[in-house]
Structure formats: structure tokens, C-alpha cells
Image (cartoon, rainbow, N blue to C red):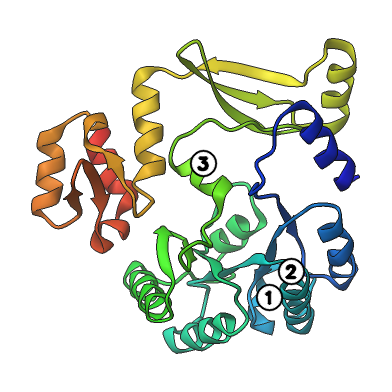
């Protein structure tokens, strides 16, 4: 199926010789056994959902794979793909800085040039939200979470990894191409149930949302030729907000010309949260710790 999809895409458009074709995979033994076949099908980059290399934290996160399975999957990814990545979650309940530093150093010995490192966030409507509300676990306070982010940054930089986005680290040349497309506020096409696209047509930028239900999506594709649920023109103000949200997460920042209020930007620079590099405005390390507040300050 994967080979057929890639072949069909190649038949309706021109694929670059250096095209990046990434597939996400879970590190269960069932999925890992297919890595060689996936590579033969044309996938040239694998992204693994590891989330933790600590057995207790894996259980807390509700993952079905074991640490041994995670390590074996990473080893198989390294054998079958020139480029691979995996993710880890930190700032977990009861996790100490020392424990996280040890886990991260172990992950670096397995890494292939790219790591995604996220702090746990509690979203409404999830099981985590209910458990947290009911007092089943306590999240690290903001000071500890900030300290763990700074520790992460220090360890990664000392090992040759650049934070090209707030939660993504790569050695030069190992950055994820499709993620850069989002963060640079370029167009992207989402295909399939629940997929989102951002496309520009005749100078107008649109956000397009596909129907989430696979069955409903498929029926609409059959009957109408597409599975679009919503197509919305993005206002000029909306584009500024989105570009700031995306661009300030990266080490490239945003062009100074899109800032709606230069006075506010200069105030944030004076306080050490933003800096200017040529015509780019970039978040400092201190700014990354309060990124959401900076964006609110710039656009409100």
C-alpha cells in the first residue's frame, strides 16, 4: 500500500531526487518487523513514538511497548534508514532533573541526528486531564519545568544538536523538512480523514479541514470527489498570528516586517526576550520559556 501511494504521487507530480518521505511508527515488535519492507517501499525517514526510556514513565504515559522494544526498534530503524528520529517526553510527575539528564544521555547514544523532546502538557478532554483534576498526580511546577528545559538545551548543544525549533533538535543537515515547511509558514497539503491543509490560491491563503470520520470522508470522496468539511479564508490578521506562532518557535524567527507593533517588540528586546539578526526577529532562550506570553503581547 505504501509503495502504491508513493508511486501514484510520483505519477501526478514531480518528486525531487532528494525528496524526504517520512513515516511515523510505533516501536512495538509487530511494527518494527516491517521496517525493512517499509524502506523498500520508498520511505527514507522514520519517526518513532518512543516517549520514554523509563519503564515507570512508559506505564504512566499509557504506552504499550516496553523499553527493550523501544531500543530494538531504534536499532532496526538505524539499520534500515539513513535518517530516523524519535521523541521523548519530559517534565513528568515525580521526574527529577538527574533522572531526565540520565535518560537523555542514554537517548543520545541511540540517536541518529534528530530528537524531538516535549514537555508533557495536559489537554482538556483527555484521560490525563481527568486524572490530574482528581489529584491522581501532580505536575512539576513552572520553575522546575523551566530548569529542565534549560538542562535539555545544554545537554543537546554540548552533543552537537541545534534547537532549530523549541522542541526539536538536530545535527546540521538532519532537520525534518516537512516540519520546517509548517514553521516557515509555507503551504502544505493534508490528505485523508481529519487532515488539515494550508494552501494559497490567487494570492489568498486558505485553511482546509477534512472530515474526521473515515467512513464519512470516504463516502463524500466517492460521491463528491473530495472529503472537505471546511474551507476558510485566513484573514490578514490571522496570517500574522499564525506566522508568529510558527516562526518564533524556530531559531530562524520571523521577518521584522510582519510584526504588528514594533514598539512592543522593542520592549521585549530590551527585556531580553527577543533579539534582531539582520531582518529577522528571533526568540532568545529566555523568550522560549514564555513563548505564548510573548506572542500574546505582540498581537493583542
* Residue 300 shows in this picture: no
- Residue 71 percent location from the top left of the image: 73, 81
Q: Which mark is residue 63?
A: 2
- Alpha carbon distance from label 2 to label 1: 6 Å
- Residue at (74%, 26%) from the top-left corner? 211
From the viewer's perspective, is the residue at label 3 or at label 2 nearer? Answer: 3
* Residue 158 shows in this picture: yes
* In this view, 237 is above or below 125: above
Tags 2 and 1 touching, CB below 8 Å: yes
- Between 136 and 24, the one nearer to me in the picture: 24
Tags 3 and 1 touching, CB below 8 Å: no
- Alpha carbon distance from label 3 to label 2: 29 Å
Taking the image as shown, residue 4 lies to the left or right of residue 72, namely right
Q: Which mark is residue 58?
A: 1
Q: Earlier in the sequence, mark 2 or mark 1?
A: 1
**Quadrant (top left/top right/bottom left/bottom right) for the C terminus:** top left
- Residue at (69%, 83%) from the top-left corner? 55
Residue corresponding to mark 3 = 181
Q: Earlier in the sequence, mark 3 or mark 1?
A: 1
Amino acid at each position: 500500500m505504501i509503495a502504491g501511494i508513493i508511486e501514484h504521487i510520483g505519477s501526478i507530480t514531480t518528486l525531487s531526487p532528494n525528496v524526504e518521505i517520512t513515516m511515523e511508527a510505533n516501536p512495538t515488535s509487530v511494527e518494527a518487523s516491517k521496517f525493512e519492507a517499509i524502506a523498500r517501499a520508498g520511505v527514507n525517514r522514520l519517526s518513532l513514538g518512543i516517549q520514554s526510556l523509563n519503564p515507570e514513565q512508559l506505564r504512566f504515559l499509557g504506552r504499550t511497548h516496553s523499553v527493550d522494544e523501544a531500543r530494538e526498534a531504534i536499532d532496526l530503524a538505524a539499520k534500515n534508514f539513513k535518517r530516523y528520529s524519535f521523541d521523548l517526553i519530559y517534565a513528568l510527575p515525580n521526574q527529577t532533573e538527574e533522572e531526565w539528564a540520565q535518560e537523555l544521555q542514554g537517548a543520545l547514544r541511540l540517536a541518529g541526528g534528530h530528537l524531538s523532546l516535549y514537555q508533557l502538557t495536559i489537554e482538556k478532554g483527555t484521560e490525563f486531564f481527568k486524572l490530574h483534576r482528581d489529584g491522581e498526580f501532580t505536575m512539576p511546577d513552572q520553575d522546575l519545568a523551566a530548569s529542565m528545559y534549560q538542562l535539555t538545551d545544554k545537554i543537546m548543544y554540548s552533543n552537537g544538536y541545534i534547537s532549530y525549533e523549541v522542541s526539536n533538535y538536530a545535527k546540521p543537515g538532519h532537520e525534518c523538512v516537512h516540519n520546517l515547511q509548517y514553521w516557515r509558514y509555507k503551504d502544505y497539503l493534508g490528505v485523508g480523514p481529519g487532515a488539515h491543509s494550508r494552501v494559497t490560491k490567487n494570492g489568498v491563503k486558505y485553511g482546509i479541514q477534512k472530515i474526521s470520520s473515515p467512513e464519512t470522508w470516504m463516502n463524500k470522496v466517492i460521491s463528491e470527489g473530495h472529503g472537505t468539511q471546511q474551507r476558510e479564508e485566513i484573514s490578514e490578521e490571522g496570517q500574522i498570528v499564525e506566522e508568529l506562532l510558527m516562526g518564533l518557535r524556530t531559531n530562524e524567527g520571523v521577518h521584522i516586517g510582519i510584526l504588528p507593533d514594533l514598539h512592543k517588540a522593542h520592549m521585549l528586546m530590551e527585556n531580553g526576550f527577543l533579539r534582531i539578526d539582520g531582518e529577522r526577529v528571533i526568540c532568545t532562550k529566555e523568550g522560549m520559556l514564555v513563548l505564548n506570553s510573548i506572542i500574546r503581547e505582540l498581537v493583542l
